[in-house]
Image: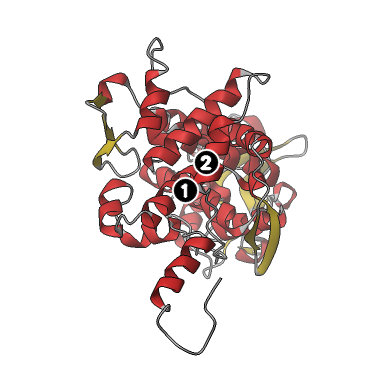
Amino acid sequence: MAKATPVLAKWKKNKRGHSPVFIRIADREKTRYVSTGVRITERQWNEKKGEVRASAKNADLHNATIRTMLATADQHKVRMKLEGAAVTTDDLKRALSHKAPPRPQDPPLIFDEYRQFMKSKRARFRASTLEVYKALESHLQDWLTPRARVSDITPGFLTDLQDHLIGEGLANVTTNKLTSRAKGFCRWLVEHDLLTKVPPVKPLKTARGHVVRLTLEELEAVRDVDLSDLPAGYRAARDLFLMAAYTGQRISDISRMEWKDIRSGVWYVVEGKTGVVRQVPLPEPAREIVEGRGEEDRPVPRLSDQRCNNYLKVIGERAGLTALVTVRYQRGGDIETKVVPKHEVLTTHVGRKSFISLMLEAGLSTKDLLGLTHSDLRSLRSYAAASEQHVRDKMRIVFSGTKGGTGIG
């Protein structure tokens, strides 16, 4: 006669050390197994008693499930005996399968959910934000296995991701940006009841470097450099950079500019990042760029941030931007300092910083700039950098009447 016995299937242990509990149905000819839906570690299983140890989490519930299935097996054997029929392993398996709890579905795959996350956000994210999320996906693919599941997102998930990114040689500022996006993905998982809690993570410290900006002469050199032998994308990159330098606005907002946003020489822009509405006067060189595209559908060209920044480095080198600047990167706890030609760090962001620095040098107050380019003074100050000559000139004026030296310069 077939016999039902609870067993811990150690041969099916997963990576976390958990094994399923089966009801083994055996006679002299066959052995069959029916899952109870219980998964525990070897230390939580009492082999002699055939039950989960009381110290294990949900032990009472697990043991009740096991006992119910054993009782069902006994009842079926009694009924078959009364009917004068032999009890086979297949009979008992069919009887227990009706009583077995539904097999839990495997947790969804991380990359399947990531693609759903991207799909749901595509219409709301700026192009530059989407590029960051695509970069994050690439790093996750390097770090995780293709079959990694949402259940693998432990409390240390984001901290472990930080360690991986630093190990890949990324600077702390880039690591923080990618980790922040990963945190947004985890928040989405929580909102969709796929994760119970967003893993905690602390931003890494970042080294504050010098603000890289262009002088007015350097800006004119970029404007006037001959790019006629290069593809049209280079001239598009220059126009976008110059618009940032002439208006002080984010490249993401400039890229969304439409003809209807420009009225009487003023650009009415709704910031994509903050939702703030600004009225930005277009100075003559900015109007020339816009008016030069009068036959086009849009007042400014379209170009991805990455491609634009790559083109700008070539343009900067052609324009003779060879002045040396000091840049600082922090990777983990190490701070690296490099001295490089300015064209190697030329990006659209440098155009925005150049505008702010040039306006401050011209006498515009931070209060005036606050309404034009930023929403808070702290952020504005991080963008500002006066030229060394401008500082020397101001110091000469301030200390011109003092004694004890021959003056500055």
Q: Which residue is drawn at 42% across and 77% down?
A: 400
Q: How far apart are marks 1 and 2 (CA)?
A: 9 Å
Q: Residue at x 70, y 60 (%)?
A: 338
Q: Can residue 196 be seen in this view?
A: no
- What number of labels is visible? 2
Nearer-N-terminus badge (1/2): 2
Task: Characterize the local packing of mark 1: few (<14), some (14-19) or many (20 or more) Cα atoms within 10 angstroms.
Answer: many
Q: Is residue 238 visible?
A: yes
263 w.r.t. 366: above or below? above
Inspect the image, locate mark 1, and give the three-letter code of the amino acid beneath it: Ser
Inspect the image, locate mark 2, and give the three-letter code of the amino acid beneath it: Leu
Q: Position of residue 94 (x, y in %)?
A: 56, 30
267 w.r.t. 5: above or below? above
Q: Position of residue 22 (x, y in %)?
A: 62, 46
Of 148 and 114, which appears nearest the observer? 114
Q: Label 2 near label 1: C-beta < 8 Å?
A: yes
Of 36 and 260, which appears nearest the observer? 260
Q: Residue at x 27, y 25 (%)?
A: 262
Secondary structure state at the residue bearing disc 2? helix
Quarter holding the C terminus? Answer: bottom right
Q: Where is residue 271 in the image (x, y as percent from the top left)?
A: 31, 39
Of 169 and 28, which appears nearest the observer? 169
Residue extending farthest to the bottom is 404
Quarter holding the N terminus? Answer: top right
Residue wearing tag 1: 354
The quadrant where residue 331 appears: bottom right
Q: Please give left or right for residue 372 compared with residue 23 in the image.
A: left
Task: Characterize the local packing of mark 2: few (<14), some (14-19) or many (20 or more) Cα atoms within 10 angstroms.
Answer: many
Residue wearing tag 2: 219
Residue 245: mark in rendering: none
Q: Residue at x 44, y 60 (%)?
A: 382
